[in-house]
Image: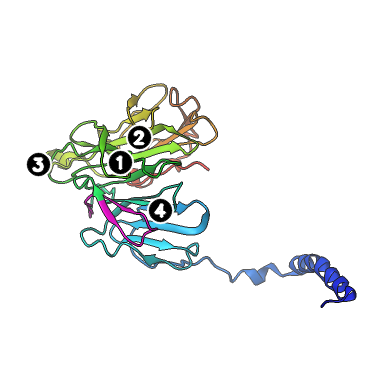
């Protein structure tokens, strides 16, 4: 049993420790810290990361989807990673992954990477896990080929929307657009179809108001017999088929957004909707820069048009805009 005198001594020491460490820190030569460097903690692999998703309530748990390497998981905030998709033998390319915000055990994976040129890695639809990645079930959309975006309702793990690009290399097809499920992937409804050559690139909503959604499209059919290969020249060449759509009923119906300061759209785009704004504040980035709307997409203005860094990287090969 600790005596009163010992307790007083421990209390005095605990009160002095913060002052002691502050004094040591102030006297420390900053050159002692110069040897510290950032390092890659893995997993060690080549190529890109196509998609990531975290788990609400588990700050150290993340999932990563790779264009040709399946799904990897960490429960240690990235210190260690391990593969969890190896049981799926038919496909290894992952374009989108999303953990249900209301259920950490439910994970949806869209196979097929977004990339349009070079090494195109296609998939065979959507997979689902209900045990945090231990086992997987194929739940449909086998002809979607490339899925770059998935959204799961913040409160209902059975309500999800999938962006499907469709067949890139061989044929025109109706298996492109936005597909919606209200029963966890048992059945699907095509909520938006632009045409048989145009796929969906990005889906976005604010988690505090999922009824309002944005979606962007691009031309995704490659015709090798057409001049320029069916898509024109290389990076930076305008590509038709890019549109911005909006839904106000959580993806049941869609209307195209045009005008109001929105630039002519081409190539790859990305969109985001801000929380805490009743879905009024929206962002869009494309080759010409970053655009913002404060009235739910009715009008747009370009942000810092003079800064060439605020635009797509590599001439539209990649892009992203995200809101805190």
Which mark identifies residue 215?
A: 2
Residue 135: in magenta span = yes
Residue 209 left/right relative to 136: right
| Residue 100 x %, y % | 41, 48
Residue drawn at x 90%, y 75% as measured from the top left: 5
Q: Where is mark 1, residue-wise?
A: 163
Name the N-terminal-most of marks 4 and 1: 4
Tell which residue pokes out farthest to the bottom in this image.
Answer: 1
Tell which residue pokes out farthest to the right in this image.
Answer: 5
Of 232 and 71, the residue lying toward us: 71
Which mark identifies residue 52?
A: 4
Name the N-terminal-most of marks 3 and 2: 2
- The 10 Å Cα crowd at callout 2, few under 14, some 14 to 19, many 20 or more, is many
Tell which residue pokes out farthest to the left in this image.
Answer: 225
Q: Total of numbered circles in the picture?
A: 4
Contact, mark 3 vs mark 1 (Cβ under 8 Å):
no
Residue 14 left/right relative to 248: right
Which mark identifies residue 225?
A: 3
Name the N-terminal-most of marks 2 and 1: 1
Q: Which residues are magenta?
A: 119-138
Q: Quadrant of the N terminus?
A: bottom right
* Helix, strand or loop for the magenta stretch, by majority: loop
């Amino acid at each position: 049993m600790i005596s009163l005198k010992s307790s007083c001594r421990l209390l005095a020491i605990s009160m002095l420790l913060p002052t002691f460490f502050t004094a040591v820190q102030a006297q420390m030569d900053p050159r002692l810290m110069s040897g510290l460097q950032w390092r890659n903690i893995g997993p060690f692999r080549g190529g890109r990361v196509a998609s990531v998703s975290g788990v609400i309530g588990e700050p150290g748990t993340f999932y990563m989807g790779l264009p040709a390497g399946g799904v990897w998981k960490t429960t240690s905030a990235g210190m260690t990673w391990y593969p969890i998709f190896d049981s799926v033998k038919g496909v290894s390319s992952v374009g989108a992954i999303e953990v249900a915000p209301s259920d950490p055990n439910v994970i949806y994976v869209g196979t097929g990477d977004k990339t349009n040129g070079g090494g195109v890695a296609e998939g065979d639809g959507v997979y689902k896990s209900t045990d945090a990645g231990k086992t997987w079930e194929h739940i449909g959309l086998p002809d979607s080929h490339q899925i770059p975006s998935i959204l799961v309702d913040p409160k209902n793990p059975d309500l999800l929307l999938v962006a499907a690009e469709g067949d890139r290399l061989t044929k025109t097809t109706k298996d492109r657009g936005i597909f919606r499920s209200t029963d966890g992937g048992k059945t699907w409804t095509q909520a938006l179809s632009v045409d048989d050559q145009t796929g969906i690139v990005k889906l976005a909503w604010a988690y505090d108001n999922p009824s309002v959604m944005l979606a962007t499209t691009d031309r995704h059919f490659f015709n090798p017999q057409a001049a320029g290969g069916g898509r024109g020249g290389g990076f930076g060449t305008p590509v038709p088929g890019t549109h911005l759509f909006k839904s106000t009923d959580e993806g049941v119906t869609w209307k195209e957004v045009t005008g109001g300061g929105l630039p002519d759209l081409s190539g790859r785009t990305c969109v985001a909707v801000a929380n805490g704004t009743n879905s009024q504040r929206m962002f869009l980035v494309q080759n010409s820069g970053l655009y913002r709307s404060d009235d739910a997409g009715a009008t747009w203005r370009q942000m810092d048009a003079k800064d060439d860094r605020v635009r797509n990287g590599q001439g539209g090969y990649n892009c992203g805009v995200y809101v805190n």
